[in-house]
Amino acid sequence: MLASLSSLARTAAQTQVGLGAFNVIQLEHATAITRAAVHAGVPVVLQISQNAVKYHGGDLTPIGRATLAVAERAETEVAVHLDHAEDVDLIQRAVDLGFNSVMYDGSRLPDEENRETTRRVVELCHAAGVDVEAELGEVGGKNGVHDPSARTSPADAAQFVADTGVDLLAVAVGSSHAMTTRDARLDVELIRAIGEAVQVPLVLHGSSGVSDEGMLQAIAAGMTKINVSTHLNQVMTAAVREALAADPALVDPRKWMAPARAAVEAEVQRLLELHAGRAGV
Ligand code: G3H
Ligand code: ZN
């Protein structure tokens, strides 16, 4: 069933577990991630990025409606979230479709403009009962460049939340987007300091570059929403490669998509159980 992101995140933060958030590019991602959450017995976030919308010809509606339909039918709580949106019209579209939350990403804008636009997005979304995540201190790598050096200051983070009224805050603490190795070094002390300064749940972007142990340390230090995308794409693509290599005569996409979907489901379930503190590293 559909659920509010802020209530899922608040519950997770209070119980010091992670809330897994995974990116949907195709319908198979949505079904695999949701089945994994049902099997793990935990809530989950299905998120669609502005880049994924671009891949779908700039139209959020088909993939958005499909993802919402998967979430509505799920036997666990699922928040459907618009990820890394820089376009306010796209945010409005997500609100109209019935998304539970959006991430407005103004982290590339000058600070004052980021605050001002985030505030406007919060007004627009809250009027419709939709939660807002925003980012302060750009998490590196959105252009494919690994820049783990960005850092968010705790005092600035607290001021940003007070100025804008956001429900969740993404912060820069050493992770970087689109990493294909899991060796990012997180600043755990900084996570703790931001967590003490800020009252809303914190979001870790670029979690594909973070090891299992790093994720557990981040959650213990106060990180709540754990965003993973590239890692699942690696798992999915490896399974596709294996299926195609094993049978060069394959033509039916269902024959190579099914093992890929199963591999994503298994890895999401493993990560969700890890985030819930139910698996060792
Ligand atoms: O917003 C999405 C995440 O930050 C995913 O980043 O692809 O590096 O895991 P990742
Ligand atoms: Zn991100």
Image (tube, rainbow, N blue to C red):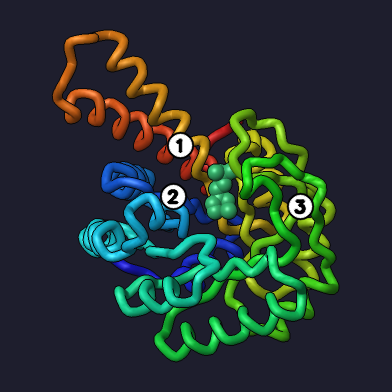
Please, what is the three-letter code of the amino acid marked with disc 3? Val
Question: Going 74% across and 78% down the picture, which residue do you hit?
Answer: 160
* Mark 1 CB within 8 Å of ligand 1: yes
Q: Is mark 2 within 8 Å of ligand 1?
A: yes
Image coords of residue 226 (percent x, y): 57, 52
How packed mark 1 is, by other alpha carbons closer than 10 Å (few <14, some 14-19, many 20 or more), is: many
Say which residue label 3 marks: 173
User: Residue drawn 64% across and 69% down?
Assistant: 106
Residue 232 is labelled as 1
Identify the image quadrant of the N terminus: bottom left
> Is residue 175 positioned above or below 193 on the image?
above
Cβ atoms under marks 1 and 2 closer than 8 Å:
yes
Q: Which is nearer the N-term, disc 1 or disc 2?
A: 2
From what the image shows, is residue 187 above or below residue 61?
above
Amino acid on which the number 1 mark rests in the picture: Leu
Give the Cα distance between marks 2 and 3: 21 Å
Q: Nearer the viewer, residue 68 or 245?
A: 245
Name the residue that disc number 2 marks: 23
